[in-house]
Amino acid sequence: MFEGVLPAIITPFKRNSAMDLDVQGLERNIAYLLSCGIHGIVPCGSTGESATLTFGEHEKVVNVTIDTVNGKVPVLAGTGSNNTAEAVILTKAAKDAGADGVLVISPYYNKPNRAGLVKHYTKLADLDIPVVIYNVPGRTGQNLEPELIAELAQHSGIVGIKEASGNIGQVSRIIEMTRDEDFAVISGDDNLTLPIMALGGKGVISVAANVDPKRMVAMCEAAAKGDWKKALALHFALSPLFRSMFIDTNPIPVKKAVELVGMAGGPVRLPLDNLDEKKTADLKKVLATIPAAKKTVAKKKPAAKGSRR
């Protein structure tokens, strides 16, 4: 269900004192990504600044995404928390809204033991909506080991993992240990998408696809077809963008980038702060090399919507 290029979309805010949600901007951004052939979409992840969204805003972003997508591609809603009860609330809300699945980050700060992790993910998977685990030790302070992932993959409701450990050996081991399960390993790092797909991974939950979705789609589709020469050429063509997305804490660079190419972005919320002038100048140099970057898409109207709530 979840494969190919799934942009982890930003949450655009208005440039007012409250930094309100820019709902129309969100709709335009999603409509543009759909027009570029993306294979799925992920609202309310770390790239979407989920940590600073209220429950009401979180639900609004998920609902707007589902309505705008209107069944064209799967919606994988971020619903994770370091509080299992909160994750249950967010997951139930996403299910009720019509999300196709949920992306659940490993609980951060608490550093739960193995039994706690199993119970946390099992409780969410028992809510009868497909769950994709999100392993990102750099944000959570705790790595999910391959043996634990293999155990969780046996649950029919746990359908995949977004692997952002940066450890290609670990990714290979997870794929090896889950080959007999209906379980997708998805890259959580744009720059590791191609090697992970070469090992049997199914695609990427991508930051860079917010900015250059067409070439990201082309790379992943080439890899899926076994056209490794084309995929490798695109990987290297995209590599400067991959690096630029992490010249500062995500999503600071990507929010600036989408705004520079004509999409809805707006500021980041504290405790993050906006990209400084030097890094912005460096980012502009990279964006100038992107074929589609000069074509503004921000004024594009979204497709007619139908409610799936």
Image: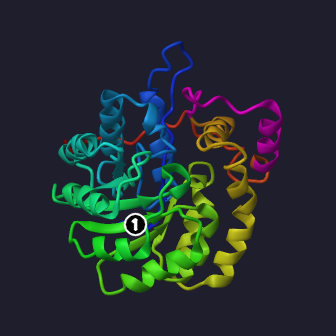
Instruction: Identify which residue is drawn at 42% across, 68% down.
Output: 3
**Between 239 and 233, the one nearer to me in the picture:** 239
**Between 15 and 139, the one nearer to me in the picture:** 139
Residue 88's place in the image compared with 137, above or below, is above
**Residue 290 rendering spot, x and y as whole percentages:** 73, 53
**Residue 217 rendering spot, x and y as whole percentages:** 55, 64
Instruction: Identify which residue is drawn at 63% across, 83% down.
Output: 228
Q: In which quarter of the image is residue 212?
A: bottom right
**Residue 216 in magenta?**
no
Report the quarter where the N terminus lies: bottom left
**Residue 272 in magenta?**
yes
Identify which amino acid the numbered label 1 is placed on: Ile
Instruction: Identify which residue is drawn at 35% across, 35% down.
Output: 58
**Residue 262 rendering spot, x and y as whole percentages:** 64, 36
Instruction: Identify which residue is drawn at 33% across, 64% down.
Output: 114
Report the quarter where the C terminus lies: top left
Left or right side of 230 for 34? left
Q: Range of the magenta residues?
A: 264-286
Query: How packed is label 1: few (under 14 Cα within 10 Å), some, or many (20 or more)?
Result: many
Left or right side of 101 for 201? right
Left or right side of 258 for 128? left
Whether residue 29 is visible to the viewer of this picture, yes or no, is yes
Local SS, label 1: strand
Whether residue 301 is visible to the viewer of this picture, yes or no, is no
**Residue 8 rendering spot, x and y as whole percentages:** 48, 50
Query: Mark 1 highlights which residue?
Result: 161
